[in-house]
Amino acid sequence: MTTIITKASNAILVGRILTNQGPSIVTKTLDNNFIDITTAHFPTVSQLLNAKDPVSIVKELTHSNKSNIIGNVDDILSKQSLLSPADLHAIKACGVTFAKSMLERVIEEHTGGDRTKAEFFRQQLTETLGDIDLSTIQPGSIESDEVRVFLKQKKLWSQYLEVGLGPDAEVFTKCQPLASIGSGNNVGIHSCSNWNNPEPELVLAVNNKGTIVGATLGNDVNLRDVEGRSALLLGKAKDNNASCSIGPMVRLLDDDFGMNDLKAMKISLTVEGKETDDFLLNDSSSMSLISRDLKDLVDQTMDEHQYPDGFFLFTGTAFSPTQDRGDTKGIGFTHHVGDIVSIGNPDIGVLVNRVIKSKDCEPWEQGIGELMRNLSKRKLL
């Protein structure tokens, strides 16, 4: 698995890596080295991103910590994986923000999570919709209300259409703070699932004031059969050991990389079944297709809630792979153990993970208490 950090020379990057001292905050220098910028003032990424001017701080820390070079980026990534760039942050996620994936959620619900029935219902749903293009409909609009009435008459209304077309976005907790994994690690699928897929997403780094200060990539691993049985099983479908991947690093927003870049960002997905069937899936999508404004998703996440340590927000996916594999003829895509999933964008890099069962992934044992003990031992608290 090859993690790739963006080659953009103007990128201000923040990430985490495990050093001999423990989890450390790093940035990438112009000469392609990782430099440790962990200090007593900013011992966690959370505190750094909550600061008044993270960009200036990273630049200053890079200048003042020149002696803390860990090594060449490519050399290090050839030997070890990255930690998730999120530490004390809440890990939140928005679902059903793209028309394509919204329809796939409806298919899951109406088939009860039975993938053998998916293609038949997909065709039926397409025929019923006819010329209606859900991607052009503004959630909460008069037009969306008209579509609601039409689909209810056809007995095709769904809780997923409610959050996809209605005024309120779906916002849920993907995993606990420090439970997300970084690029180069194994990502986990619950062993009960036989119908699942990667969900490549833009992930926003948001400070405790609700300001979007950076962005990265994520894999909101999804169990289609579990959630299809009941949306009340969302926790089991979404939050399992190593089922949340974020990285490779956060690119901070600045004059060279701003909200307009995020709204136009293209995200690529590659799935390689090297260990089982030589399966290859290549796809891409644009954030320009999202149905809700990114700031609106942040505002709805913070509605009557506070996040003192900030949060990372998955913004939803346009990807719902339906391509058959050799052993799934006619029933579409699902993961095989050993799949290599690569999620990329040139402005951020490539997040890469190998798929195995969650029970076989490295257990999550480094929680907040352990991090605080480590930072205290290093005299960073």
Image (cartoon, rainbow, N blue to C red):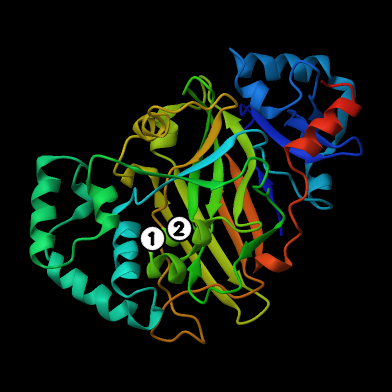
Q: Are marks 2 and 1 in contact (CB under 8 Å)?
A: yes
Q: Secondary structure at mark 2?
A: helix
**Three-letter amino acid code at disc 2?**
Leu
Depth order, front residue of 64/222? 222
* Alpha carbon distance from label 2 to label 1: 5 Å
Q: Is residue 295 left or right of residue 183?
A: left
Within 10 angstroms of label 2, few (less than 14), some, or many (20 or more) residues?
some
The x, y position of residue 84, in whole percent, is 68, 43
The x, y position of residue 137, in whole percent, is 18, 46
The x, y position of residue 143, in whole percent, is 10, 45
Q: Is residue 224 left or right of residue 28?
A: left
**Three-letter amino acid code at disc 1?**
Ala
The quadrant in which residue 102 appears is bottom left
Residue with the mark numbered 2: 234
For image coordinates 51% across by 77% down, the residue present is 194
For image coordinates 20% across by 69% down, the residue present is 126
Residue 70, numbered circle:
none
Depth order, front residue of 138/40? 40
1 is higher (above) or lower (below) than 7: below
279 is higher (above) or lower (below) than 330: above
The quadrant in which residue 158 appears is bottom left
Residue 331 seen: yes
For image coordinates 20% across by 42% down, the residue present is 138
102 is higher (above) or lower (below) than 90: below
Quadrant showing the C terminus: top right
Depth order, front residue of 345/366? 366
For image coordinates 33% across by 51% down, the residue present is 98
Residue with the mark numbered 1: 231
Q: Secondary structure at mark 1?
A: helix
